[in-house]
Amino acid sequence: GENVEQHPSTLSVQEGDSAVIKCTYSDSASNYFPWYKQELGKGPQLIIDIRSNVGEKKDQRIAVTLNKTAKHFSLHITETQPEDSAVYFCASPNGGYALNFGKGTSLLVTP
Amino acid sequence: EAGVVQSPRYKIIEKKQPVAFWCNPISGHNTLYWYRQNLGQGPELLIRYENEEAVDDSQLPKDRFSAERLKGVDSTLKIQPAELGDSAVYLCASSPRLGAEQFFGPGTRLTVL
């Protein structure tokens, strides 16, 4: 099945700085790459996703880039704010359409 | 529009007891997933439904776990008997169709003592 590796496991940035989280996947047939944000005590919330027919997608301060050749994709958060502090998960579908998740990145944005 | 609803939010039981979790997906979503999330890990699939049919249950420990989705809407996940290692957050997600975005509920945090 699909194997998704995510780095770093923890990330601390100053408010206003950028944060980058990277994931690699193993199945070259994967074509959908979502990112989820999970706050304490809540379920994962989809924040952005990208399909394999594009290389980059932006939504305000959040962007995702995809490199199909290298089989990796990244989440970029610019102008970070304290409310961006959470655990972020990348994911990629296995052959059965369920998602295989990375182990998560705990992001802390300090004022 | 209401999101995915799960209940209960928290459950504490002793080992060997049964427990059940309930999920109501977003209206009109045909695909329903149950995931288990261990502490410090990402969610892992237990079972996927397409309408009322379980189409991917290869990761469900069938000796003690069971699930149903009668009428293709609400779903129930049951554990009997529970073991200490079952302590986790059980997440339900739904999707309008196969391969589309998945939306998660708040989860049920199970503690087995």
Image (cartoon, coloured by chain):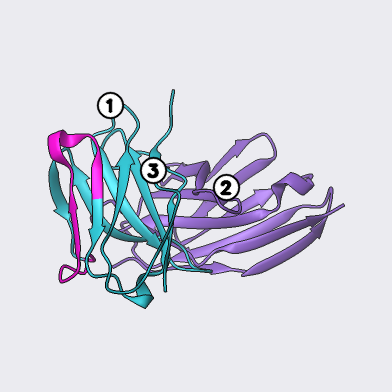
Left/right placement of residue A76 relative to residue B97 reads right
- Choose mark 3 or mark 2, whichever is in front: 3
**Circle 1 is placed at which residue position?**
B28
Per the rendering, the colour in which chain B appears is: cyan
On the rendered structure, is B99 left or right of B111?
Answer: left
Mark 2 neighbour density, 10 Å: few (under 14) some (14–19) many (20 or more): many
- Image quarter of residue B16: bottom left
**Looking at the picture, does residue B88 appear above or below residue A58?**
below
Q: Residue at x 25, y 37 (%)?
A: B74
Element carrying mark 2? strand
Q: Residues within 10 Å of mark 3 (few under 14, many from 20)?
A: many
Q: Residue at x 27, y 43 (%)?
A: B32
Name the residue type under label 2.
Val
Q: Earlier in the sequence, mark 1 or mark 3?
A: 3
Chain assignment, label 1: B
Reply yes or no: does residue A65 show up in magenta.
no
Which quadrant holds the C terminus of chain B?
bottom left
Determine contact: label 1, label 2, CB under 8 Å: no
The circle drawn on residue B6 is 3
Residue designated by label 2: A64
Residue B98 in sight in this render:
no
Find chain A in the image and tell me its colour: purple
From the viewer's perspective, is A7 left or right of A103? right
Q: Closer to us: mark 1 or mark 2?
A: 1
Which quadrant of the rendered structure holds the N terminus of chain B?
Answer: top left
Q: CA distance from mark 3 to mark 2?
A: 30 Å
Depicted B62 relative to depicted A65: above or below:
below
Magenta span includes B66: yes
Magenta residues (range): B59-76
